[in-house]
Image (cartoon, rainbow, N blue to C red):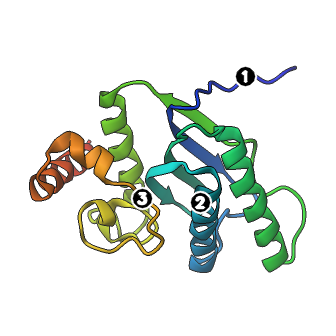
Amino acid sequence: MPRIARQKKEDAIFHVMARSISEVDLFKDDEDKLNYLALVKKYQKTYEFRVYGYCLMDNHLHLIIDANGADISRIMHSINFSYAQYFNHRHKRHGHLFQDRFKSKMVKSEIYLYALSAYVHNNPCDIKGYENCPEKYEFSSLSIYLGLRHDPYELVDDGFIMGMFSKNPKKARESYMKLVYKCSDK
């Protein structure tokens, strides 16, 4: 049975999700997560896409990507293929790492982008110890949005989404924090 064609537009923003096969975590430790972020940065330079947010969990990941004229399939194939090679070499394994091809959903409205960003940034609430403080999770861009830490890879363009809240950075952060924590209460 043929696969359903992926919705694509070169100037679109996408919610990208990828999950590991059931018997292995996608990221075994922080080093794996740091390597994945380094690969995102490497291919960001190649394809010139923008990252508006991310969260790397042990068995899956979320990215908010503006393709900026590039093909989202090429972007994600490059990142995930390189990561699988690294992971298999480092952990002395072979075979598939990702459950399937990545999933993507085109962002078609500002309201969906707000909700998506809050959803991605609330993912750490599912981790013991981060239930009430997702901003402390190192492998999410939330703390970058809230101005709590520097973006070590200069990966995230938080100005696009934050600019929708206010041109004043302090007010934008306050409004964004209210959105994220309001969504985590549900």
Circle 1 SS class: loop
Badge 1 amino acid:
Ala
Q: Are marks 3 and 1 in contact (CB under 8 Å)?
A: no
Q: Are marks 1 and 2 in contact (CB under 8 Å)?
A: no
Rendered location of residue 67, percent (x, y): 55, 40
For the C terminus, give its image quadrant: top left
Badge 2 amino acid:
Lys
Circle 2 SS class: helix
Rendered location of residue 150, percent (x, y): 33, 74
Tell me if 25 is positioned left or right of 12 in this view: right
Rendered location of residue 90, percent (x, y): 79, 79
Badge 3: few (under 14), some or many (20 or more) residues near its Cα, within 10 Å?
Answer: many
Q: Residue at x 30, y 29 (%)?
A: 111
Q: Residue under circle 3?
A: 156
Circle 3 SS class: loop
Q: Residue under circle 1?
A: 5
Rendered location of residue 138, percent (x, y): 42, 72
Q: Earlier in the sequence, mark 3 or mark 2?
A: 2
Tell me if 154 is positioned left or right of 22 in this view: left
Question: In the image, which disc is placed on residue 113?
Answer: none
Q: Earlier in the sequence, mark 3 or mark 1?
A: 1
Q: Residue under circle 2?
A: 45
User: Which mark is in front, 1 or 2?
Assistant: 2
Is any part of residue 97 visible from this angle? yes
Tell me if 167 is positioned left or right of 94 in this view: left
| Mark 1 → mark 2, Cα distance in angstroms | 27 Å
